[in-house]
Image: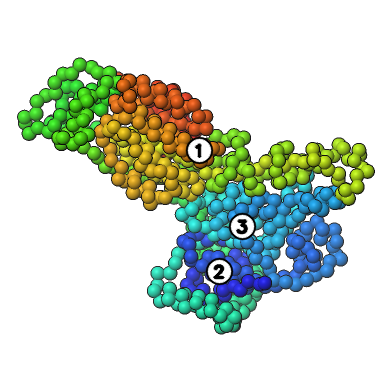
């Protein structure tokens, strides 16, 4: 049954979207259009409405590729073989919608298994690109498709031809179509290389006019109540629009661009700092389409100005910024601070390896100089009485030990990061790490003998070929005689999500020099990227006497922002508690997802002055770190926050060695550097 489509003429507002769709339909050389915007802004409705306006086309009867019978047109191999004895039919151009779970075989075409076995020859089964030839290919949520599928579609749309060279197939057929993609930027962006392949791009937003919103609701209710009557009310306007579209297509070859306007186009693209020359070519073709729609044989400056924003929106780049100014000289030491001959508290902390106890505030002018203290080891804990007083609230905490709150640092765009590729077969979805998949999805990379209903015909035929003479007397009715031992199945790969677990030292020392703000900014940036890649992100902080799961595994950006902003900093360093809580979280996650590949990132200086048992805190933490390293499914990273100085303890390096983790210094804890660390790129 034919689907009832809401008419394009009845759409409220969205004039620019309507104009962009018409330009792509008038001149396929534009290269398609990408619609980026909010949910519920009539993107899909208008694409389907455009398909209803496309004129009828003459096709070869029975051709799955919708080949044209015209002598100068390119055709599929079957139509080339039969030419010129071609029977014809007339029908409307097709609208082909690409599902998100489409495989490469379904998009580009593959082997027709039943016919190949019956005939003994490789028979090609056309895919969606063949069905969309001379029609409209609609890719909803194009940013959620696997990159290799998007590459395949854009290559065919740009070249006008689909070529298949795999599994014993060598086949090509024309694939010229109007390509329309839609996406919600909140769910992830396309790679710049793929984004550039779309000729036009529009940002779509809902109407802010109250009257338009009321009209929209009224029209939609009328359409749902009586579609036939609603369509009849807009039939005249729809016919007029379809007639203008057909006229513009026929008039397009007569439209030309003056030489001086080509210079104007080149200057616009140069000023926008676009890469390459595709923008120049697309702008010229889009301006020609607009002139043809208006019935003008000459492209004008106004035509170029109208189409320029659609062409440059996704290609415009900022010019390289000037080099930063030199850093300012270090501030002079305030007069009320300690003198150079008095050991500062920070140096005493480096020498002792523990969080310093600062004295209670004194009245101005009456503060005595700090008394000399013997050197302490990093494993020594504070007296139990002082700990109990602080934890039980028997007296106010000293000013230096009060909790601090830091804002989330600047976020940034995360470059691709992934876990190590292996041979484990997994289930799941996402866009992060490439993995073998236990579903009929993803790219076919090789064949195997493992049991599966995903038959690899090419590998099966190769396995059966040496025995065909011996099996010639078989009565199975097939041209190729197969046995169970010949069957091969496909091994496919696709991208899936990961768990990123941050374990952050939230003791008092982390508040120095904005380290916690930078850490929060990095975590938030990776969370935003994880939302786009369908990952999960979690965070554990350890401070005072315990470790807390601040952020359970989640993809909620709003929840993460609130929890990160409210995370306090201050107190002592219970690293052992952080390791135990990390093991619990990862263990629970792996019980539910045995084939998962969690990435654990420790941000700490390695110091530990609170033990869980009776032993020394540092030795206890190293022992726990070694236990965490026993599970090879976990990838661990240690970022050392200990600042360089005359005396350093290197405890974070020892921690990394105990858990066989990658180790980096605090200088690497910059926004982009942290992402490079996770990606495995380091100096």
Q: Is residue 533 above or below residue 177?
A: above
Viewer-proximal residue, 465 or 679?
465
Secondary structure state at the residue bearing disc 1: helix
Q: Which comes before the other along the chain, label 1 or label 2? A: 2
- Whether residue 579 appears in this view of the structure is yes
**Foreground label between 3 and 1:** 1
The residue at the point 72 percent across, 71 percent down is: 91
In this rendering, the answer to whether 334 lies above or below 211 is above
Which is more toward the observer, 665 or 478?
478
Residue 170, position in %: x, y? 77, 48
Mark 2 or 3 closer to N-term?
2
Front-lying residue, 553 or 301: 553
Q: 669 left or right of 633?
A: left
Mark 3 nearby-residue class (10 Å; few <14, some 14–19, many ≥20)? some
Write the residue at 31% across / 21% down: 614
Mark nearest the camera among 1 and 2 is 1
């Amino acid at each position: 049954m034919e689907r009832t489509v809401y008419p394009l003429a009845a759409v409220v507002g969205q004039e620019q979207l309507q104009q962009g769709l018409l330009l792509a339909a008038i001149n396929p050389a534009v290269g398609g259009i990408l619609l980026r915007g909010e949910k519920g802004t009539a993107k899909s409705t208008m694409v389907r409405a455009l398909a209803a306006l496309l004129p009828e086309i003459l096709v070869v009867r029975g051709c799955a590729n919708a080949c044209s019978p015209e002598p100068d047109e390119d055709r599929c191999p079957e139509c080339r073989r039969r030419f010129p004895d071609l029977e014809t039919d007339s029908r409307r151009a097709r609208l082909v919608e690409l599902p998100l779970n489409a495989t490469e075989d379904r998009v580009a075409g593959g082997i027709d298994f039943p016919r190949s076995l019956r005939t003994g020859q490789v028979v090609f089964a056309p895919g969606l690109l063949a069905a969309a030839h001379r029609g409209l290919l609609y890719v909803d949520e194009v940013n959620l498709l696997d990159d290799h599928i998007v590459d395949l579609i854009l290559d065919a749309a740009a070249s006008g031809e689909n070529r298949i060279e795999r599994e014993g197939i060598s086949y090509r057929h024309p694939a010229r179509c109007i390509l329309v993609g839609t996406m919600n930027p909140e769910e992830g962006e396309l790679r710049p290389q793929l984004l550039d392949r779309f000729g036009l791009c529009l940002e779509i937003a809902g109407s802010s006019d109250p009257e338009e919103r009321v009209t929209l609701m009224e029209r939609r209710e009328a359409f749902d109540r009586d579609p036939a009557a609603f369509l009849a009310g807009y039939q005249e306007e729809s016919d007029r629009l379809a007639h203008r579209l057909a006229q513009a297509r026929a008039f397009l070859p007569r439209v030309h661009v003056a030489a001086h306007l080509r210079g104007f186009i080149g200057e616009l693209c140069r000023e926008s700092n676009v890469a390459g020359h595709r923008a120049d070519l697309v702008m010229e073709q889009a301006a020609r389409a607009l002139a043809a729609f208006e019935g003008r044989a000459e492209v004008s400056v106004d035509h170029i100005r109208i189409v320029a924003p659609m062409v440059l929106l996704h290609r415009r780049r900022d010019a390289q910024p000037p080099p930063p100014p030199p850093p300012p000289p270090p501030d002079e030491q305030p007069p009320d601070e300690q003198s150079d001959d008095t050991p500062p508290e920070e140096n005493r902390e480096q020498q002792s390896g523990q969080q310093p106890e600062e004295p209670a505030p004194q009245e101005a002018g009456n503060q005595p100089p700090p008394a000399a203290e013997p050197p302490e080891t990093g494993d020594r804990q504070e007296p139990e009485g002082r700990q109990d007083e602080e934890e039980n609230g028997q007296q106010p905490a000293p000013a230096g030990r009060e909790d601090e709150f830091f804002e989330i640092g600047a976020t940034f765009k995360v470059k691709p990061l992934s876990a190590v590729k292996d041979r484990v077969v997994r289930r799941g979805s996402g866009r992060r790490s490439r993995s073998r998949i236990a579903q009929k999805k993803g790219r076919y990379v090789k064949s195997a003998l493992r049991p599966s209903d995903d038959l690899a015909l090419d590998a099966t035929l190769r396995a059966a070929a040496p025995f065909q003479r011996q099996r010639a007397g078989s009565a199975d009715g097939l041209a190729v005689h197969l046995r169970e031992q010949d069957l091969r199945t496909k091994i496919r790969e696709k991208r899936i999500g990961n768990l990123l677990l941050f374990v952050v030292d939230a003791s008092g020392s982390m508040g120095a020099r904005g380290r916690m703000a930078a850490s929060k900014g990095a975590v938030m940036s990776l969370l935003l990227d994880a939302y786009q890649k369908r990952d999960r992100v979690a965070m554990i902080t350890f401070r005072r006497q315990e470790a807390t799961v601040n952020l359970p595994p989640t993809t909620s950006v709003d929840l993460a922002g609130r929890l990160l902003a409210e995370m306090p900093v201050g107190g002592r360093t219970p690293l052992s508690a952080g390791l135990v809580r990390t093991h619990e979280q990862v263990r629970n996650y792996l019980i539910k997802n045995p084939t998962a590949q969690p990435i654990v990132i420790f941000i700490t200086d390695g110091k530990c002055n609170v033990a869980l048992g009776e032993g020394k805190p540092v030795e206890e933490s190293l022992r726990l770190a070694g236990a965490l390293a026993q599970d090879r499914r976990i990838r661990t990273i240690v970022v050392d926050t200990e600042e360089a100085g005359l005396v350093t303890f290197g405890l974070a390096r020892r921690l990394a060695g105990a858990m066989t983790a990658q180790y980096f210094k605090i200088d690497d804890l910059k926004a982009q550097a942290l992402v490079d660390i996770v990606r495995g790129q380091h100096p």
